Amino acid sequence: MSDVSDACAASPTGKLGLRIAAIFVILVTSLVGTFFPVLSKRTGVGKVVHPAVFEVAKFFGSGVILATGFIHLLEPASEALGPSNLISAGGCLDDAW
């Protein structure tokens, strides 16, 4: 028990400036990605960009959201199935799962 609490209490060492800068980089890039389509449509810059570019970006964003959801649901689902459902235990799931 003490090993777990010691590991959780350990502070990250080094590169603190890079970690703080990463927060602001993520903030700025997400703001640009969010506001670019809205502002380009309102200002007329969107007419320069081909409409297919907006469609591809929209589909890519939807795919990222779906993939994130699937990845976060994968582990709880495999835990609910249990190890008895693996092929090595006589089940139907591949052992890699």
Image: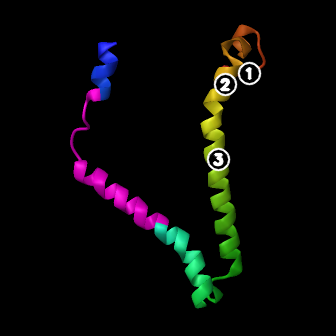
Tell me if residue 17 is in the magenta stretch: yes
Q: Earlier in the sequence, mark 2 or mark 3?
A: 3
Q: Earlier in the sequence, mark 1 or mark 3?
A: 3
Tell me if residue 62 is in the magenta stretch: no
Helix, strand or loop under label 1: loop
Image point (60%, 38%), residue name: 72
Residue 8 in picture, x, y percent from top left: 32, 27
Residue 48 in picture, x, y percent from top left: 62, 88
According to the image, label 1 marks what residue?
Answer: 93
Residue 17 in picture, x, y percent from top left: 23, 53
Helix, strand or loop under label 3: helix
Q: In the image, is 90 to the left or to the right of 46?
A: right
Q: Main secondary structure of the magenta part?
A: helix
Amino acid type indicated by mark 3:
Ala
According to the image, label 3 marks what residue?
Answer: 67
Q: Residues within 10 Å of mark 1 (few under 14, many from 20)?
A: some
Q: CA distance from mark 2 to mark 3?
A: 17 Å
Q: Nearer the viewer, mark 1 or mark 3?
A: 3
Callout 1–callout 2 Cβ contact below 8 Å: yes
Quarter holding residue 25: bottom left
The boundaries of the magenta stretch are 9-30
Q: CA distance from mark 1 to mark 3?
A: 21 Å
**Which colour style is shown?**
rainbow
Amino acid type indicated by mark 1:
Leu
